[in-house]
Image: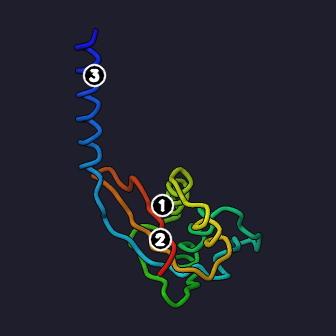
Amino acid sequence: MRRLLTAVLAVTVMLGAGMAAAQQVVGGYAAWIGVDDLYNSSGQRLSEPWQVIRQDRANYHRFRIRQAGDEGDPWFGDANNRAALESLVRRGHIERSAANAILRGNVMIHVTVYGSGRGIDRIDVIVGN
């Protein structure tokens, strides 16, 4: 039984290492979260940081609402990819102070996109200069 547990643990560690190795930085962008990013297209105030980040990309790509400091990206011009962005940020970890800063607006964010052969796997968001 002990050998079986050791073997299972070894395989799990190897698989985890393989998955981590397959995931790599594929790019990123910086964006200034301005007042326009805090409201959805219907004018409702957004209440979650992932909604604000998604709206920022919709503003950038679809509505051409851009603030100084906003950078382009090759992924989130597509509405389906923006939905995936929101989901990835929502499922990830974000510090309470970073979430609060995003919800207040007037803050710079830096987004790092990780992927593999099958697409975007993870998003990291950092608030600050």
| Disc 3: which residue | 8
**Are the residues tagged 3 and 2 within 8 Å (C-beta)?**
no
For marks 3 and 1, the one nearer the N-term is 3
Front residue of 91/93: it is 93
Give me the C-alpha separation between circle 1 and circle 2.
Answer: 7 Å
Element marked by disc 3 = helix
The kind of residue on which mark 2 rests is Gly
- The residue lying at 29 percent from left, 39 percent from top is 16
Q: Between label 3 and label 1, give the one nearer the viewer.
A: 3
- The residue lying at 44 percent from left, 69 percent from top is 111
Element marked by disc 1 = helix
| Disc 1: which residue | 81
**Are the residues tagged 1 and 2 within 8 Å (C-beta)?**
yes
> Residue 33: horizontal and vertical position, in percent?
58, 79
> Residue 100: horizontal and vertical position, in percent?
65, 68
Quadrant in the rendering for residue 46: bottom right
- The residue lying at 62 percent from left, 69 percent from top is 52
Residue 83 seen? no
